[in-house]
Amino acid sequence: AQSVTQLGSHVSVSEGALVLLRCNYSSSVPPYLFWYVQYPNQGLQLLLKYTSAATLVKGINGFEAEFKKSETSFHLTKPSAHMSDAAEYFCAVSLQGNNDMRFGAGTRLTVKP
Amino acid sequence: NAGVTQTPKFQVLKTGQSMTLQCAQDMNHEYMSWYRQDPGMGLRLIHYSVGAGITDQGEVPNGYNVSRSTTEDFPLRLLSAAPSQTSVYFCASRDTTGELFFGEGSRLTVL
């Protein structure tokens, strides 16, 4: 079965600094990859997704992620953190035609003023 | 835009009690699912459905039942609640591109 590993349960950055959240996946076939964000006491909402088109994917709120097959990675980045980016971020993987989307354990992003 | 609606938002149960978490979506999505979220474990799939009359087990199905009589509704039943089922539960539906749309969650405490 497919799986994802998120490196770092907590990441802290200063406002204006680079945000880098790491995600590695395991899959026997080309995967679909997703990043979701969860704000306190809310459900998850999609930031961006990779479904075998362009390897550099741009999402909402200035986030982007690059699919690197050789590294089995799908890291999330944002050039300049904003206070409003403080949230929990989840990487997820599914396979085409498969009904089981697997989520990572999540990374909590803190943004310091 | 209603999207995915879950009720109740909060519930406290005693061990052995039963309850149903309700989920409804108005996007005409065939696929619906239930996840539970626990600290440090991300979201784990409990049950899912690919259409009315069809359900299947996910990663952690034990202790939960589901049914899908209509496209819109996908209730999750706990027949005999246990403290290990204390969690936050999310219902989600999925569109044809694979994107999941989540409800706001139901926080369940079992004493």
Image: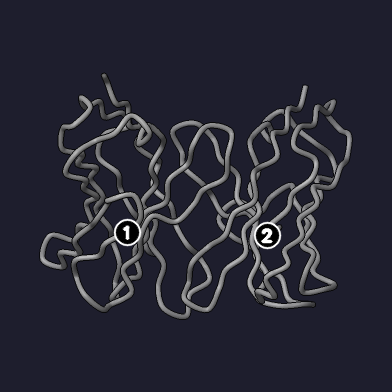
Residue located beneath label 2 in the image: B1
- Give the CA distance from mark 1 to mark 2: 22 Å
Q: Please tell me how crowded label 1 is: few (under 14), some (14-19), or many (20+) other residues with Cα within 10 Å.
A: some
Q: Observer-nearest residue: B85 or B76?
A: B76
Residue located beneath label 1 in the image: A59
**Mark 1 near mark 2, Cβ–Cβ under 8 Å?**
no
For numbered disc 1, what is the local secondary structure? loop
* Side (left or right) of B22 relative to B57: right
* Side (left or right) of B107 relative to A107: right
Q: Amino acid at mark 2?
A: Asn
Instruction: Locate residue B84: give its quadrant.
Output: top right
Residue drawn 80% across the image and 27% down it: B12
Viewport quadrant of the N terminus of chain A? bottom left
Instruction: Locate residue A84: give its quadrant.
Output: top left
For numbered disc 2, what is the local secondary structure? loop
Residue drawn 69% across the image and 50% down it: B62
